[in-house]
């Protein structure tokens, strides 16, 4: 029997049936505050005595790992581990496990949804009608446009395939290109060429080393006028000040994002810009994705604890 800390918001807000696998295996579950990202103080309070940790995207400091006196494994219910202090975990011999590709479909479908919402101003139309108006803003179609996909792993591949099936030409960039089928023409290109040619850019990559921005003033100026950017990956990829300037000047048609430096975003931040379509970090928050990711994360954790 081991104590296992559960911190992903999708699992603490409404604990799914899959967690019963851990209880049936004889483990004790410890939950962080339901539906909220736990902070450093809460993690320091809860983690001592826990041998396993089913972790989310909450930032984890080295101080948290210092108090992890019994920890054997951290199992993510997703793929990103940039929120974890990996050198500190390695130093303590703690295994880090990922649920590779488990929430890819949910994130990919949201990315396509955000592209369409920005192109057609769907939130503005809905809000205007609910306010008693009848707003009619001319939109843009995906068919015939060039979609650039930055990062063609499990999520990016699906975005490329869906965009291709909708009649878009797709350009892909990935440091490790691999073969996959699309309906319409697909080309691997260099990153700068992708930014200069694409009408729509969708981000599916980890943050850059050293905190550099992928989307900065220079890249925004190199993009085609009226382009769209969608970010369902990491907030740290984009310079929000540069994005705001590009939106204000009309160089960028719109920005769709599911990720923020501070969650929930602060009043007056980029999320509140009229040309931004913002969702509340729901990329992998579907019935199917939560179930798949939880099952994989639990299986990974049980295997690690059995060693």
Image: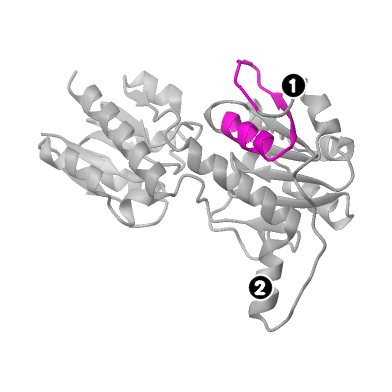
Instruction: Tell me where residue 222 appears, x and y as whole percent.
Output: 88, 35
Nearer the camera: disc 1 or disc 2 = 1
Residue 65 visible within the image: yes
Q: CA distance from mark 1 to mark 2?
A: 38 Å
Name the residue located 68 percent from the left edge and 48 percent from the top edge: 115
Instruction: Tell me where residue 132 appears, x and y as whole percent.
Output: 69, 84
| Mark 1, residue position | 187
Residue 127 is marked as 2
Tell me if residue 157 is in the magenta stretch: yes
Please state the extent of the stretch shown in magenta in the rendering: 156-182
Q: Nearer the viewer, residue 112 or 50?
A: 112
Tell me if residue 257 is in the magenta stretch: no
Q: Nearer the viewer, residue 56 or 116?
A: 116
Instruction: Tell me where residue 241 appears, x and y as whole percent.
Output: 77, 49
Q: Nearer the viewer, residue 200 or 274?
A: 200
Residue 149 is marked as none
Crowding at mark 2 (Cα within 10 Å: few <14, some 14-19, many 20+): few
The numbered mark, 1 or 2, whose residue comes first in the sequence reads 2
């Amino acid at each position: 029997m081991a104590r296992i800390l559960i911190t992903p918001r999708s699992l603490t807000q409404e604990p799914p049936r899959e967690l019963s696998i851990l209880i049936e295996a004889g483990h004790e579950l410890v939950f962080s505050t339901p539906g909220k990202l736990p902070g450093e103080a809460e993690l320091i309070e809860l983690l001592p005595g826990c041998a396993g940790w089913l972790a989310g995207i909450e930032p984890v400091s080295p101080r948290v790992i210092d108090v992890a006196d019994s920890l054997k494994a951290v199992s993510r219910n997703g793929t990103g581990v940039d929120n974890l202090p990996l050198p500190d975990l390695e130093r303590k011999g703690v295994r880090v496990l990922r649920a590779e590709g488990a929430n890819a479909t949910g994130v990919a479908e949201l990315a396509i949804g955000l592209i369409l919402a920005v192109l057609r101003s769907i939130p503005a139309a809905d809000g205007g009608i609910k306010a008693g108006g009848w707003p009619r803003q001319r939109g843009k179609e995906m068919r015939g446009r060039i979609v650039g996909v930055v990062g063609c792993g499990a999520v990016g591949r699906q975005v490329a395939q869906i965009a291709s099936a909708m009649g878009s030409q797709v350009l892909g960039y990935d440091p490790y290109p691999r073969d996959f089928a699309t309906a319409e023409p697909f080309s691997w290109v260099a990153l700068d060429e992708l930014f200069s040619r694409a009408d729509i850019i969708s981000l599916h990559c980890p943050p850059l080393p050293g905190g550099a921005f992928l989307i900065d003033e220079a890249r925004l100026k190199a993009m085609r006028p009226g382009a769209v950017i969608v970010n369902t990956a990491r907030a740290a990829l984009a310079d929000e000040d540069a994005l705001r300037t590009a939106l204000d000047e009309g160089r960028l048609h719109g920005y769709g994002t599911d990720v923020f430096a501070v969650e929930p975003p602060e009043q007056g931040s980029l999320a509140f810009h009229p040309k931004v379509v913002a969702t509340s970090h729901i990329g992998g928050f579907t019935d199917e994705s939560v179930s798949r990711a939880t099952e994989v994360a639990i299986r990974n954790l049980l295997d690690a604890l059995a060693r």
